[in-house]
Amino acid sequence: MEMDLASIHKQFPAAPDYLASIYILQRDYGSASHSRLAEWNEVSTPAVSQAIGRLRRLGLVHQKKYENVALTEEGRELAMKVLRRHYLIEHLLVGVLGYPWDKADEEAKLLQTAISDDLSEHLYHRLGSPQTCPHGNPMPKSAIEAKLLGAPKLTEAPAGQLLTILRITEEGEQLPTMLAFCHQNGIRPGARFFVEQTDPEAVRLAANHPSVDSNAETTVTIPFSMAQHIRYEQSSRQPPS
C-alpha cells in the first residue's frame, strides 16, 4: 500500500527528517553511513541503527550488513517530497512573509510534514516554480541540479578570482551559526565577491573590489569550517566604474 508523508510521520515522527538526510547525503556525497546520519541528526549511532530498522520495516530503506543505507524507490519519492515541501515553505517564509533568511530552515523543518501535496503544488506554481531553496540548494530533479551539485567549494577558489555564490550546502545549514554568519555578511546565492586570500585556515572575500559590481563596502574572512560548505562559480570580470 502506498504511504504518504502524513501516515509515515504518524507512525514514526522522525522518519521525514531521516529520509531527507539520507537523500541529501547520497546526493551530495554518494553514500549515507550510520556515523554521518548520527552527526547530521545530532543523535547517537545506536539511535540511528534503531531508526534505520524502523524505516526498513516500513519498506523505505534497505541495507546489507556492513554497508551504507540506501533508500528504496518509495523512500526516495517520499524524501524528495520532504525536501520539496521544505524548500517551498522556506520561499514562502522568506519571499512572501519577510521572515529572516537565516531562520527559515528551522521553521520549515517544523512545517514540512504539515502541508498537503495539493498545497505544495499550489505553492510551487504561485512562487514562480523555484529551482532552488533560498539558500541555493537544488529542488530534486530541477534543471540546474547537476550544475549546483558539481560546483566547486569556496575553499578551492584561487586568490584573484571573481566569483558568484551559488549555494550554502544543506550540511552547512546544519552548522549552528553558519546561516546567521552568511546573512550578516551578505554571503548568499547571487552575491559576487573578489577572492583576496585563501589559506588552510580561512578565505577572505571582498565585496568592495573595483571588479565587483556592488555598492557594498565589505571584506569578510570566512573560516575554513564554513567556507567548505559554500559553492561558487567563476564570474566575468567587470571593468571599474
Image (tube, helix red, strand yellow):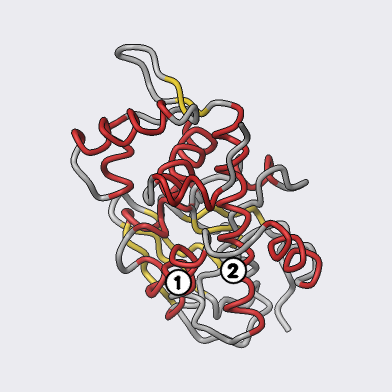
Q: Is residue 193 visible?
A: yes
* Gap in angstroms between the C-alphas marked 1 and 2: 8 Å
Q: Where is mark 1, residue-wise? A: 107
Identified at 30% across, 65% down, the residue is: 176
Earlier-in-chain disc, 1 versus 2: 2
Disc 1 + disc 2, Cβ < 8 Å: yes
* Furthest residue toward top: 65
Relative height, residue 68 to residue 157 (above, below): above
Relative height, residue 23 to residue 57 (above, below): below
Q: Nearer the viewer, residue 100 or 232?
A: 100
Q: Is residue 78 left or right of residue 146?
A: left
Q: Nearer the viewer, residue 60 or 109?
A: 60
* Furthest residue toward front: 1
Q: Amino acid at mark 2?
A: Ile
Q: Residue 79: percent from the left, percent from the top?
A: 55, 43
Q: Where is mark 2, residue-wise? A: 89
Q: Is residue 190 left or right of residue 8?
A: right
Q: Residue 148: percent from the left, percent from the top?
A: 64, 47
| Residue 7 numbered mark, or none | none
Q: Residue 41: percent from the left, percent from the top?
A: 31, 48
What is the secondary structure assignment of the residue under circle 2? helix
Q: Residues within 10 Å of mark 2 (few under 14, many from 20)?
A: many
